Amino acid sequence: AQSVTQPDIHITVSEGASLELRCNYSYGATPYLFWYVQSPGQGLQLLLKYFSGDTLVQGIKGFEAEFKRSQSSFNLRKPSVHWSDAAEYFCAVGRSNFGNEKLTFGTGTRLTIIP
Amino acid sequence: NAGVMQNPRHLVRRRGQEARLRCSPMKGHSHVYWYRQLPEEGLKFMVYLQKENIIDESGMPKERFSAEFPKEGPSILRIQQVVRGDSAAYFCASSPPGSANTGELFFGEGSRLTVL
């Protein structure tokens, strides 16, 4: 069965500092990997996704993530955070074939930005 | 192009009542997914439907919960005889069929159920 681990429940960074959110997955085949962001009281917005090809993927809002198969990781990074980045971030893994996009989510990392 | 629409956004029920949550997928999307988010937890898959068919209900509780996606109209998640433990945010997501599918799910803003 597939699973996702986000080891950091809560992270606090200063505005303008760099950010890395960790994500480790367990999956028996080639995974499809996603990062979603959820603002308070809102739904989820896709930041970026990895299906195949270049292991460094670029997303919206200046985010990027790197797929490392040897480490079963898909960490999210941003070189300089903005106060508007404060939100909950979810990593998710999906099956490597279309037809059922059922995703397994991690428990999330809450990001707080301090001035 | 309107996104995934869910209503009601907030629903309060007393124990033993029924809750009905509705989801209209994005235009052109024929696949609907329901997820539940308990407080301080991630999203848990409940059910995957296509028009008039339940494709995968492996995440649905065995009792009191049901879902449908009729030929016409929105998808409905129905919870009978609600209990306090059903209090959660219920998210609907959709995706397009066939070649238009990119593997991405598009989420609504959720329906937040509170059981008193």
Image (cartoon, rainbow, N blue to C red):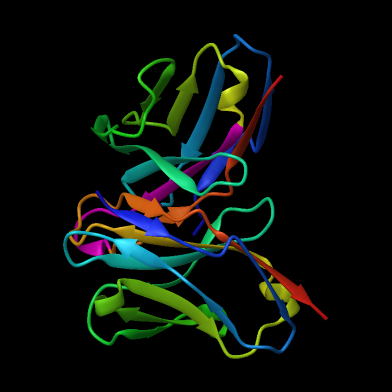
Examine the rendered structure and indicate whether residue A113 appears above or below residue B114. Answer: below
Where residue B58 appears, as percent x and y from the top left, is 29, 33
Where residue B63 appears, as percent x and y from the top left, is 39, 15
Comparing A11 with B30, the one in front is A11
Check if residue B93 falls in the magenta segment. yes
Where residue A24 appears, as percent x and y from the top left, is 38, 67
Comparing A78 with B96, the one in front is A78
Examine the rendered structure and indicate whether residue B6 appears above or below residue A72. Answer: above
Examine the rendered structure and indicate whether residue A40 appears above or below residue B17. Answer: below
Quarter of the rendering containing residue B52? top left
The mark total stands at 0
Left or right of A70? Residue B82 is: right
Quarter of the rendering containing residue B15? top right
* Identity of the residue drawn at 71% across and 89% down: A16
Comparing B24 with B21, the one in front is B21
* Identity of the residue drawn at 28% across and 66% down: A32
* Identity of the residue drawn at 51% across and 79% down: A60
Comparing A52 with A68, the one in front is A68
Examine the rendered structure and indicate whether residue A81 appears above or below residue B94. Answer: below
Check if residue B19 falls in the magenta segment. no
Task: Work out which quarter of the rendered image holds the C terminus of chain A and state it.
Answer: bottom right
Residue found at the far right of this picture: A115
Whether residue A28 is visible, yes or no, is yes
What segment is highlighted magenta in the picture?
Answer: B88-101
Where residue A65 appears, as percent x and y from the top left, is 42, 80
* Identity of the residue drawn at 30% across and 37% down: B49
Whether residue A63 is visible, yes or no, is no
